[in-house]
Amino acid sequence: MSRAFDPRLYLVTARSLLRGRDWINVILAAVRGGVTLVQLREKHLDTRRFTEEARLLKTALTPHGVPLIINDRIDVALASGADGIHLGRRDMLPADARRLMGPNALIGLSLESMADAQAVLPSIVDYVAASPVFPTPTKTDTAAPLGIAGIRKIRELVSLPLVGIGGIHSGNVREVIEAGADGIAVISAILAADDPEQAARQLRTLLS
Amino acid sequence: MSRAFDPRLYLVTARSLLRGRDWINVILAAVRGGVTLVQLREKHLDTRRFTEEARLLKTALTPHGVPLIINDRIDVALASGADGIHLGRRDMLPADARRLMGPNALIGLSLESMADAQAVLPSIVDYVAASPVFPTPTKTDTAAPLGIAGIRKIRELVSLPLVGIGGIHSGNVREVIEAGADGIAVISAILAADDPEQAARQLRTLLS
């Protein structure tokens, strides 16, 4: 592992999800509520704006000691001084990412199947995100849900920190943790809440 | 300038433009015909495939001594060992690109106006590409054509190597050079030709 980090409550965000609100303020509210890790995911922004957003968010998160992870774009991560990169199957290979990001970066990898889990290289990757655990409306390009049984199987295959993502909320978070996950990643459970800070706090209480 | 390079005949390509033909072979034919610089531009590919393509092309070009420039994506350029990066107004800022790419990389910048030309930092950028010189069907998001008069004005403002791009072919290339450009960048004038090698050779003869 590159360095210590807390995988318990991982907020995945894109500015477009926060339309009409000050997106940095929403994220900082979630951090006050107990978010331990933030991923910025922007699939449709140009490089310049994505880099600007990442820098703003990095500056906002630094005083709170919460690492910023960038989805896919190592160029944006390097330029913004982000703490790490999250990779899916269409993103850069983890070995290339490690070479470019250096030994101290956090590198996360999405797993969508048992085959993905068996292929993880723990010498390169810092954490894995198993997705989707449950059906989810946020992402439409995802694989079939892994279910709680899938989390249990991945836990047997992978010793790295494991977070579940996809359709997780306060009503099912305990099942995910009891199946062996070290944390959860959420989007709408926090961002769609009327009070993101309170939503984060409620989830965090269930994770402690 | 980072290092010597020949800006005379710059081929801008994307694999999708070469559908139905072996894209590497088409590019190598153009190189045999006299292409001096190749830019890979892929706006719709995922990072993993873009990186794979860039690596294939870099491997193919290396024996010919022709530099490979990647459009926009510094992550892909770094992972593939490409020689440089080409930046537009929505891509990373040149200063960030230089910091990430290092002192030896070639950094090119698109100019679409006199204001762009006045803002170029010659200590950071290695060449500029003025676009579009003429109306072009290849790119639909471009500014109004600069015309030959625009090339002349940019030549007065910028001392860096200058290539014209947009609607240039064997019938108008001399005008562009006589207006002060050091070279031309082309897409369809080579890639849409029945014989890309011969098309490149004809252009190169007009540039020598």
Image (cartoon, coloured by chain):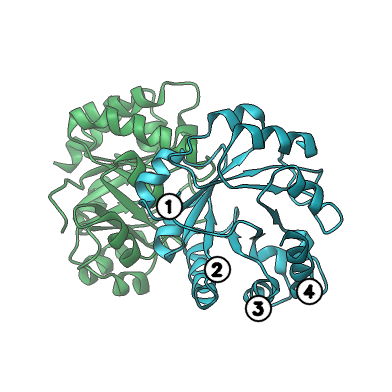
Chain colours: A green, B cyan
Q: CA distance from mark 4 to mark 1?
A: 31 Å
Q: Secondary structure at mark 3?
A: helix
Residue that numbered label 4 is attached to: B198
Q: Horizontally, is A123 left or right of A190 in the view? A: left
- Closer to us: B91 or B5: B5
Q: Mark 2 Cα within 10 Å, few/some/many (few <14, many 20+)?
A: many
Q: Secondary structure at mark 2?
A: loop
Residue B102 numbered mark, or none? none
Q: CA distance from mark 3 to mark 1?
A: 29 Å
- Closer to us: A97 or B144: B144
Give the amino acid at mark 2: Val
- Closer to us: B83 or A103: B83
**Chain under disc 1:** B
Residue that numbered label 3 is attached to: B25
Q: Nearer the viewer, mark 3 or mark 4?
A: 4
Marked residue nearer the N-terminal end (4 or 1):
1
